[in-house]
Image (cartoon, helix red, strand yellow):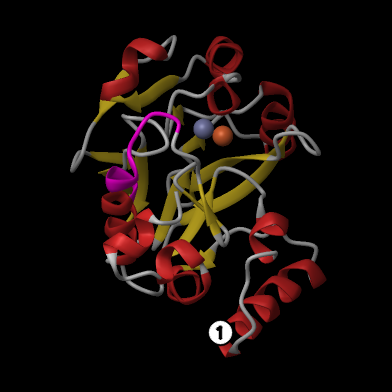
């Protein structure tokens, strides 16, 4: 494993977006996932003396792309976007669709198309590093709203996620754990989830990088295995 992942909380107390600074430790190549706003990202890059080479965009919403142009200007970086949303995102250089791959140094992400929240939403799945960046499709214990897609599309998108191995950790686009916890049932799996969260809080770590195995057992939207039951949630 060579990918280092640094969550950067943006718009705290309002949108609570997460941007992620990814660095391939072997080559030092860096990328930002979802540049919500420029300032906090620049601060972290300067602290770490990193010049990011790319921004990887999950979907076109403003709270995930607002930092794109100022960061492009500052670092002369390239912006990779979902092909289906390229006309909605200024400054796009690289267009990505289902099953494409994107290499960052020695790490490679597989692109997973996941419509529902928006029509062109994509996920970045770093297979070797067992890290999945889910944007506004999957959050801790909840999912993103259906702004453009249908419940059927969301069902299919979530099924792609639940098919991934349990030891893959996922990184969502917002810190919405507090909201998710209010839906947590009262069972053994929920206790494990709470313990996992408590441990992170105890170490002052952001609540990201939840193993999919744990999420599949506790997230009410992932626990459902009958399609019709899922549609009743909308
Ligand atoms: Zn969004
Ligand atoms: Fe968002």
Left/right placement of residue 43 relative to residue 133 reads: right
Q: Position of residue 105 (x, y in %)?
A: 36, 43
Image: 183 above or below 29? below
> Which residue is nearer to you in this view: 84 or 78?
84
**Position of residue 52 in the picture relative to residue 212 (left or right):** right
**Is residue 149 on the magenta stretch?**
yes
Give the extent of the magenta segment: 147-154
In the rendering, at what x and y percent does residue 120 appear?
31, 30
Q: Residue at x 60, y 26 (%)?
A: 63
Depth check, front residue: 175 or 184: 184
Identify whether 71 is placed above or below 229. Answer: above
Residue at image mark 1: 189
What residue sits 61% from the left and 77% below the top? 185
* Residue plotted at (62% across, 49% down): 6
What residue is drawn where x is 42% and y is 37%?
117
Q: Quadrant of ligand 2?
A: top right
The secondary element bearing badge 1 is classed as helix
């Amino acid at each position: 494993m060579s990918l280092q992942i640094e969550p950067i909380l943006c718009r705290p107390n309002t949108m609570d977006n997460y941007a992620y600074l990814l660095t391939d430790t072997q080559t030092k190549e860096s990328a930002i996932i979802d540049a919500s706003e420029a300032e906090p990202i620049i601060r972290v890059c300067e602290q770490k003396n990193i010049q990011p080479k790319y921004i990887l965009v999950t979907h076109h919403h403003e709270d995930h792309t607002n930092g794109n142009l100022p960061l492009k200007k500052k670092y002369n970086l390239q912006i990779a976007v979902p092909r289906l949303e390229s006309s909605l995102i200024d400054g796009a250089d690289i267009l990505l669709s289902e099953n494409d791959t994107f290499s960052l140094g020695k790490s490679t992400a597989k692109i997973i198309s996941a419509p529902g929240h928006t029509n062109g939403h994509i996920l970045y799945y770093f297979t070797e590093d067992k890290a999945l960046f889910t944007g506004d499709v999957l959050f801790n214990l909840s999912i993103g709203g259906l702004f453009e897609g249908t419940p059927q599309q969301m069902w299919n998108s979530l099924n792609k996620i639940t098919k991934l191995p349990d030891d893959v950790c996922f990184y969502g686009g917002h810190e919405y754990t507090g909201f998710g916890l209010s839906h947590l049932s009262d069972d053994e799996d929920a206790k494990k989830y709470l313990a996992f969260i408590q441990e992170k809080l105890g170490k002052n770590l952001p609540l990201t990088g939840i193993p999919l195995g744990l999420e599949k057992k506790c997230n009410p939207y992932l626990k459902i295995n009958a399609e019709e039951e899922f549609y009743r949630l909308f």
